[in-house]
Amino acid sequence: MLSLSNLSPARKSKSKKLRIGRGPGSGRGTFSGRGIKGQNARSGHKGLRKKAIKSFISKAPKINKMRSLYPKSEIIHWSEIVKAWPEGGRITHRALTKKGLANRKILVPKLVGPAKTINKVYKIEVPTTDSLALVIRAAGGSVK
C-alpha cells in the first residue's frame, strides 16, 4: 500500500553535484577540466571565467534569427497617399493600415517620394523623409 512513509524519488532522478578536483576517480579530478599547464590552468586566473562566458554566449538563443532588433521601415510612396486621400486629411499608422497601405504588426511605415507641390493640407503622424516634410509644411500641413 502507498503511503507517505514508503515514498522515495524515482531511480536516477537525484544526481549528486559534481565535485571538481577531488581525485582521479571523481570524473573531474587531477587537472579539473583546465588542461595540463599554462596561464589558464593557474588558480586565480580568469581563464575559466572567460570559458564560462564564451559557452554561455554560444548556448544563448539567437534573437530573431540574428536580424536587427530595431524594426525596419515599410516604405510608402507619396503617390499612394495622394490616391488614398485625394482631399487631404490626417494620416496615422492606423489609417494607413485600414486603407491597406501598411502592415500594422511588423514594420513602421515611412512616407517617401518626390512631392514637388502639394495642394491639400495633410496632418502626418508617421515618419517621413525630410524633403517631403518640408513640402508638406510649406503647403500648410503638419508633420510630427
Image: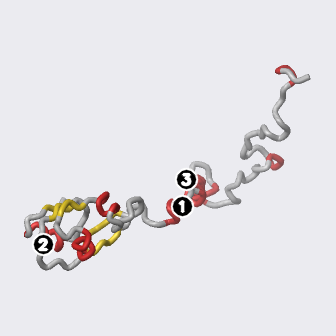
Left or right relative to 22: residue 123: left
**What residue do we see at 8% from left, 65% from top?**
140
Left or right relative to 73: residue 47: right
- The residue indicated by pointer 1 is 62
Percent of width and height locating residue 96: 30, 63
> Pointer 1: residues within 10 angstroms few (<14), some, or many (20+)?
few
Q: Nearer the viewer, mark 3 or mark 2?
A: 2
- Cα–Cα span, label 1 and label 3: 26 Å
Report helix, strand or loop for mark 1: loop
Left or right relative to 74: residue 8: right
Image color mode: secondary structure
> Pointer 3: residues within 10 angstroms few (<14), some, or many (20+)?
few
Going by the numbered disc 2, the residue's amino acid type is Val
Position of the N terminus, as image quadrant, is: top right
Q: In this rendered view, identify the residue nearer to me: 91 or 65.
A: 91
How many numbered marks are there?
3
**What residue do we see at 20% from left, 62% from top?**
124
- The residue indicated by pointer 2 is 135
Report helix, strand or loop for mark 2: helix
* Residue 38 visible somewhere in the drawing: yes
Going by the numbered disc 1, the residue's amino acid type is Lys
Percent of width and height locating residue 95: 29, 60
Disc nearer the start of the sequence (3/2): 3
